[in-house]
Image (spheres, rainbow, N blue to C red):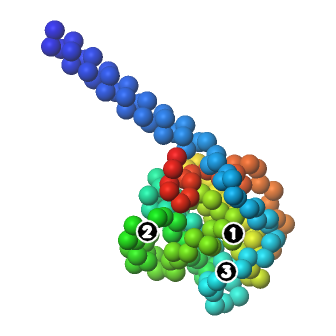
Amino acid sequence: MRKGAILIWLVILSSAVAALFWYNEWVYALPTPVPATYKGVSRGQKIHLKQKVSESNKPVFLHFFNPDCPCSRFNINHFKSLVKQYGNEVAFGIVVMSADKGYTAKAIQDKFDLNIPVYFDSAIAKECGVYSTPQAVILSPDNTLYYRGNYNKSRYCTEKKSNYAQIALDSLLNKSLHPIYNQAALKAYGCELPTCNK
């Protein structure tokens, strides 16, 4: 009798864990709802940022990050690998998109183990047309929008063929034809701004 009860309890517990995992996979596979007040920003449009992100004539790569968003946390290692690979050719920055919870630039830099600029200005997201995290924005040296979208089809950034942000970066740096992206690259997935709803 006792073994049967334990077995039933383990089956229920395993089912609950599997259901929770499946639900999380399903929720984060859905596109982020477009806000009613969203104003689109087209590729090639001039981006006017209040602060100067790069002092040099380099492309700019902005990583929109929310410390409370699981999807943002999943791609930290991928973003770090991009900084290490392209750091000499590209000016990188992190734009923290989170309600004021006491995060500091140093805390974010420590989380990423990177010494790159950290911005807490939500107006940057609006200017670039970003409404979810994580998102990548690449600006050409003349401050026009070159790419805004996802890092990868996989939320863990493990599919090399769909490294969309890296493909865009390579295209810009090599001055090659602009890649044609599918919806998985350009439709926002992840956590809604600013409250990390999903």
Q: Badge 2: how crowded within 10 Å, few (<14), some, or many (20+)?
A: few
List x then y, in percent, for residue 8.
Answer: 27, 16
18 to the left or right of 57: left
Q: Which element carries disc 1, helix, strand or loop?
A: helix
The amino acid pointed to by label 1 is: Cys
72 to the left or right of 175: left
Residue shown at the point (76%, 50%) measured from the top left = 182
Q: Looking at this view, is 142 or 156 the one in front?
A: 142
The amino acid pointed to by label 3 is: Leu
Task: Report, in whole angstroms, how far the alpha carbon at label 1 lies from the one at label 3.
Answer: 9 Å
Residue annotated with mark 2: 100
First in sequence: mark 3 vs mark 2: 3
Residue annotated with mark 1: 128
Residue annotated with mark 3: 49
Outermost residue, left direction? 2
First in sequence: mark 1 vs mark 3: 3
Q: Which element carries disc 2, helix, strand or loop?
A: loop
Residue shown at the point (44%, 58%) measured from the top left = 68
List x then y, in percent, for residue 58.
Answer: 69, 83
